[in-house]
Amino acid sequence: MAEMSESSLGLKGRVVFLKADGTPAKVDGVPTWTLDEAAEGPVATMTVNPEDPAEATFTPLPIPDSVQAAWSAQGRVSADADLDVDETREVAAQFVITVHRDEAQTAGVTFTEVTPPAAA
Ligand SMILES: [Ca+2]
């Protein structure tokens, strides 16, 4: 699951991987963030915090004229849930960033799917 909060730079996302009982789970290595483009182009820039790779900041980009009221892009954050360095078991969450023309500084991010780590 993930918690989102707004900042003056844009929208900040923080991912927290949970065990089946709802408590925070450790992951192997650092999470990997990706952000797709909309059909019309990139919706926002994404900056992963180098000191805390579980945190990324999204800054909305100007909306082109071809877009009507709002546009969206899908993103994904994943990590290796297997603490053994020799094995990999991916756990991932998807999210959607929507930037509205009239309020481009207040992008909304909704995490639409969360895949919990498989039981050990
Ligand atoms: Ca591993």
Image: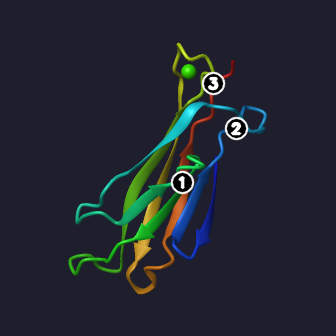
* Res. 49 mark: 1
- Quadrant of the rendered structure where residue 74 is? bottom left
The image position of residue 40, as x and y in percent, is 23, 66
The image position of residue 67, as x and y in percent, is 26, 76
Residue where numbered disc 2 is placed: 18
Measure the C-alpha gap from mark 3 to mark 1: 27 Å
Q: Secondary structure at mark 2?
A: loop
Give the left or right position of residue 86, taking residue 120 as reference. Answer: left
Give the left or right position of residue 22, taking residue 106 as reference. Answer: right
Measure the C-alpha gap from mark 2 to mark 3: 10 Å
Q: Secondary structure at mark 1?
A: loop
Residue type of the residue flagged with mark 1: Asn
Give the left or right position of residue 19, taking residue 27 as reference. Answer: right
Residue at point 66%, 45% (across, down): 16
Asked whether mark 1 lies closer than 8 Å to ligand 1, one says no
Report the front residue among 37 and 114. 37
Residue where numbered disc 3 is placed: 118
Circles 2, 1 touching at the beta carbon (< 8 Å): no
Q: Secondary structure at mark 3?
A: loop
Q: Is residue 48 above or below residue 58?
A: above
Q: Residues within 10 Å of mark 1 (few under 14, many from 20)?
A: few
Q: How many marks?
A: 3
Mark closer to the observer (3, 1): 1
Mark 2 or mark 1: name the one nearer the start of the chain.
Answer: 2
Measure the C-alpha gap from mark 2 to mark 1: 21 Å
